[in-house]
Amino acid sequence: METKLKQSNNPGEYYRRSEVSNSDLTELKNLLYPRVQYGDKEAAFRFGSLVDAIITEQKRVNYYRYTVDNEQYTEEEFNHAKEMHRALRMEASRDTFLAKVLEFADTQNFMVNHGQQFEYGEFSFTLDTRCKWDWWLPQFKFGGDLKTTFAESQAQFDEAVYFFDWDRSRAWYMDIAGSNRDFIYAISKKNCKIFKKYINRGDAIYNRGREKYEELAFQYWCLKLVI
């Protein structure tokens, strides 16, 4: 098994790769277990990409034209995203760990893991996998994720972690990297509150997320056999 950290300023490079990602598992889950989609998923992803870029990839952002790369946004969208960024920086003035993340973390690096070992029940198999980190702390060998959310309270955010399978994504990332810790910082689109979740290998969030991804990874492996 070989894990490699890749650094790239070209976001398209990651999405052109063929290794299995957490997003691939999500697409498979949606095919196997379709459920009602609430809200405008594409609009939510689009705005989240703007916030991600302002916080972690400012070189891609043109504040005069209201664009990220070639994607056009409105002035209102930019102002909202900048307000959320200010809320995160304000939180960092009270949260020492977040302050260190914003100052020292590498951003938007991706990892590939060729021949990653999986087990489902007592059956073993391998997949080539990938993940892209919002924040990666190389000196500590763990990283974390930035989210935008409609949650207005910590309790609502806790529910979102389970409902949107963010527990699965964090376990997936941890096991690709071989890290023992992980974290999520989320910014509310409703009230700009900051929500936090710290994950450790073996805790309830990690175990639940790993159980989720192992089932989907096995189904993905089976699907490859018949395609």
Image (spheres, grey):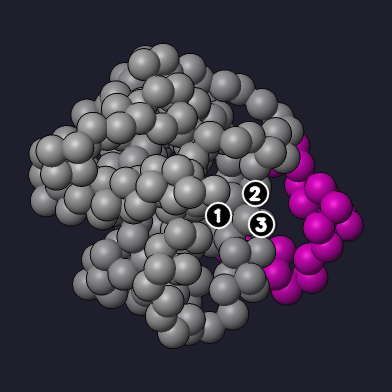
In the rendered image, which residue does mark 3 sit on?
Answer: 50
Q: In which image quadrant can residue 78 be found?
A: bottom right
Q: Distance between the Cα atoms at labels 2 and 1?
A: 7 Å
**Picture residue at 26% right of the left edge, 71% below the top:** 159
Q: Let me know if residue 190 is in the magenta part.
A: no
Image mark count = 3
Front position in the image: 77 or 116: 116
Q: Distance between the Cα atoms at labels 1 and 3?
A: 11 Å
> Which contiguous range is marked in magenta?
58-83
User: Which label number is shown at residue 85?
Assistant: 1
- Mark 2, Cα crowd under 10 Å, few <14 / some 14-19 / many 20+, is many
Three-letter code for the amino acid on which mark 2 is drawn: Ile
Three-letter code for the amino acid on which mark 1 is drawn: His
Q: Distance between the Cα atoms at labels 3 and 2?
A: 6 Å
Are dots 3 and 2 in contact, CB under 8 Å? yes
Among the two numbered marks 2 and 1 on one chain, the one whose residue lies closer to the N terminus: 2
The location of residue 12, given as percent across then percent down, is: 72, 40
Label 2: which secondary element: helix
In the rendered image, which residue does mark 2 sit on?
Answer: 54
Q: Nearer the viewer, mark 2 or mark 1?
A: 2
Q: Let me know if residue 80 is in the magenta part.
A: yes
**Residue 125 position (above or below residue 198):** above
The single residue placed furthest to the front in the displayed view is 226
Among the two numbered marks 1 and 3 on one chain, the one whose residue lies closer to the N terminus: 3
Are dots 2 and 1 in contact, CB under 8 Å? yes
Label 1: which secondary element: helix
On the question of residue 181 being in view, the answer is no
